[in-house]
Image (tube, helix red, strand yellow):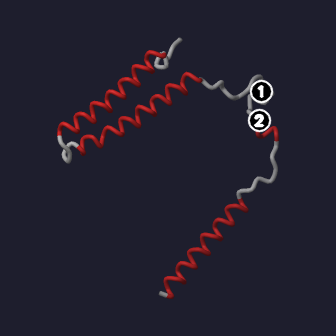
């Protein structure tokens, strides 16, 4: 039991020393505005280096994530089929798929799935 405490103390000390050394060595000595700015062949940048964010792409990504999570929720329906009655299982899966299809129709009707405008 004592050897376990000694080993845990040694591991704690080694990890603490490594974290301390990493925090000391990773500090930058100074922040230079020129080094932080984008580099364009030695000239001052003409425009902002950031590209404009596409709200359309963001909406498509959010819709993809929502339907991706819903697909992941469909997988347990296959396992539940073995343990429940077929009538209850089919009613539950039908209602779930109906909600998915209504959501898809709503997104399509609102024009959120049209990429090019």
In percent of width and height, residue 63 lies at 47, 28
Give the answer, above or below, for where 35 lies relative to 43. Answer: below
- The one nearer the camera, 114 or 86, is 86
Rendered residue at 54%/78% (across/down): 8
- The one nearer the camera, 107 or 86, is 86
**Residue 103 placement, left or right of 62:** left
In percent of width and height, residue 95 lies at 30, 31
In percent of width and height, residue 60 lies at 49, 25
Give the answer, above or below, for where 21 lies relative to 6. Answer: above
**Residue 37 circle label:** 2
Q: Secondary structure at mark 1?
A: loop
Mark 2 crowd level (few <14, some 14–19, many ≥20, 10 Å Cα): few
Rendered residue at 60%/70% (across/down): 15
Identity of the residue furthest to the top in this view: 117
Give the answer, above or below, for where 19 lies relative to 8. Answer: above
Q: Are marks 2 and 1 in contact (CB under 8 Å)?
A: yes
**Residue 8 placement, left or right of 86:** right
> Counting residues from the N terminus, which is met first, the one under dot 2 or under dot 1?
2
| Alpha carbon separation for disc pair 2 and 1 | 8 Å
- The one nearer the camera, 92 or 37, is 92
**Residue 45 circle label:** 1
In percent of width and height, residue 42 lies at 78, 30
Residue 73 occupies quadrant = top left
């Amino acid at each position: 039991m004592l050897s376990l405490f000694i080993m845990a103390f040694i591991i704690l000390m080694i990890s603490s020393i490594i974290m301390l050394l990493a925090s000391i060595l990773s500090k930058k000595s100074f922040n230079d505005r020129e080094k932080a700015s984008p580099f364009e062949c030695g000239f001052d940048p003409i425009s902002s280096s950031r590209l404009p964010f596409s709200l359309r792409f963001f909406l498509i990504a959010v819709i993809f994530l929502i339907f991706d999570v819903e697909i992941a929720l469909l997988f347990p329906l296959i396992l539940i089929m073995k343990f429940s009655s077929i009538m209850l299982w089919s009613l539950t899966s039908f209602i779930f798929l109906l909600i998915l299809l209504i959501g898809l129709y709503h997104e399509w009707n609102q024009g959120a799935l049209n990429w090019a405008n």
